[in-house]
Amino acid sequence: MECNKEKNLDRCNCTYEPCSRKGLCCQCIEYHLNMRQLPACCFTKEAEATYDRSFEHFARLVQAGSI
């Protein structure tokens, strides 16, 4: 399967500038899942800006109706 990095970058809302996985969704998802996190694209702009990508943070946002 060929990666669509340039197309993925158009939709990537990750604000962590030194990230080497931007646009490489497979690598991003693998990295974050291994750390018990979700990637930036699962969060709103405001929630992503906190850099708390934990499952627990995501669950709190869902419970609050923010996502």
Image: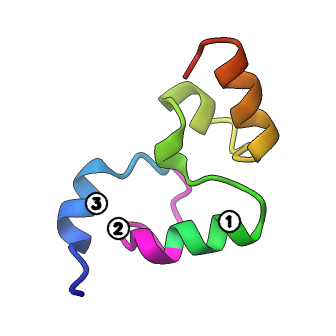
Q: Is residue 22 left or right of residue 39?
A: left
| Tag 3: amino acid | Leu
Q: Quadrant of the C terminus?
A: top right
Q: Which residue does the numbered mark 3 point to in the structure image?
A: 9
Task: Check disc 3 and report its element: helix, strand or loop.
Answer: helix
Quadrant in the picture for residue 50: top right
Identify the residue at horizontal 69%, vertical 45% (top origin): 51
Disc 2 and disc 3 in contact, CB within 8 angstroms = yes
Give the mark toward the camera: 1 or 3. Answer: 1
Q: Earlier in the sequence, mark 1 or mark 3?
A: 3
Identify the residue at horizontal 76%, vertical 35% (top origin): 57
| Tag 1: amino acid | Leu
Q: Position of residue 14 (x, y in %)?
A: 48, 51
Identify the residue at horizontal 69%, vertical 46% (top origin): 53
Q: Which residue is situated farthest in the top direction here?
A: 64
Q: Is residue 51 left or right of residue 2?
A: right
Identify the residue at horizontal 69%, vertical 35% (top origin): 58
Quadrant in the picture for residue 46: top right
Disc 1 and disc 3 in contact, CB within 8 angstroms = no
- What's the distance in space between the residues labelled 1 and 3, CA to CA? 20 Å
Whether residue 20 is visible here, answered yes or no, is no
Q: Residues within 10 Å of mark 3 (few under 14, many from 20)?
A: some
Does 44 appear above or below 11?
above
- What's the distance in space between the residues labelled 1 and 2, CA to CA? 16 Å
Magenta-highlighted residues? 15-27
Task: Check disc 1 and report its element: helix, strand or loop.
Answer: helix
Q: Which residue does the numbered mark 2 point to in the structure image?
A: 23
Q: Residues within 10 Å of mark 2 (few under 14, many from 20)?
A: many
Q: Which residue does the numbered mark 1 point to in the structure image?
A: 33
Q: Earlier in the sequence, mark 1 or mark 2?
A: 2
